[in-house]
Image: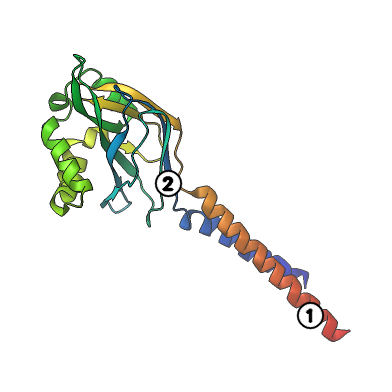
Amino acid sequence: MKRIAGTISSLFIAMLLVAAPALASPVSYVAELNTSNKNPVTNVLLLEEDDAGTVHAKVYGSALPGSGQVAISHNPAFTPRRTLIIGITDGLAPDGTPKTQIILFVNTAFAAAVNGVKWSLALPGSSHSTTIASLIAATGGGATELGWFTGDFFKQIAAPAVFATGSDFVVGEFSDFTPIGRAATIPVPGLAAGAMAALMLLLAGLAAFKLRRRQRSNLVG
């Protein structure tokens, strides 16, 4: 009987170790933001690449506050490996005049390299205004524009800015790149949720085993 119990316990522990990453789906990106005009970030688009190299686009349905801590969370059906997040805000150009600005979540090395650099020089291949127009169209459901963001934009134009999911990142505001925020906590793709689900499975299995053993004891008695 002890051997059976040990076998079952080992089985469920193995399930816990396997199921934790398999069930991991919630992903969160948390940052402190401070946009140039304190206006919210709208038209937020998440671009995430999976293990196979496929880039998935998700239109984030809520605007992000222009200042303070913000969190972008969702539940993808895959495990993201690389990420890029883009949005726009009614901000201020470097000379203080009102201007629609691009907000981009990027890796730390890219942020350091392009600090103060204009969009067209930091990310050659698409102008600032064209990217804004494409983003508005994409977040409005434009299939062609979404395809451009998951293809040429992610894999070529903005490839140097992409960050590894789960690593540190910087939030910058363009037209001339200005850091306006940084990761507040390092995002870890839903390991806690997966582990909790697997733990519940383990406990349920052990409870069922104990119940069957008790029933057999009653029959023998």
Q: Is residue 4 visible to the viewer in this orientation of the structure?
A: no
Q: Is residue 56 above or below residue 131?
A: below
Q: Residue at x 36, y 48 (%)?
A: 80
Q: What is the crowding at mark 2: few (fewer than 14 residues within 10 Å), some, or many (at least 20)? A: many
> Disc 1 marks which residue?
215
Circle number at residue 27: 2
Task: Find residue 9 and report its horizontal and vertical position in percent.
Answer: 68, 64
Question: From the viewer's perspective, is residue 213 above or below residue 196?
Answer: below
Query: In the image, which disc is placed on residue 64?
Result: none
Say how many tags the image has.
2
Task: Looking at this view, name the residue that lies furthest to the right.
Answer: 221
- Identified by mark 1, the residue type is Gln
Which quadrant, please, contains the C terminus? bottom right
Q: Residue at x 62, y 65 (%)?
A: 11
The residue mark sitting in front, 1 or 2, is 2
Q: Quadrant of the N terminus?
A: bottom right
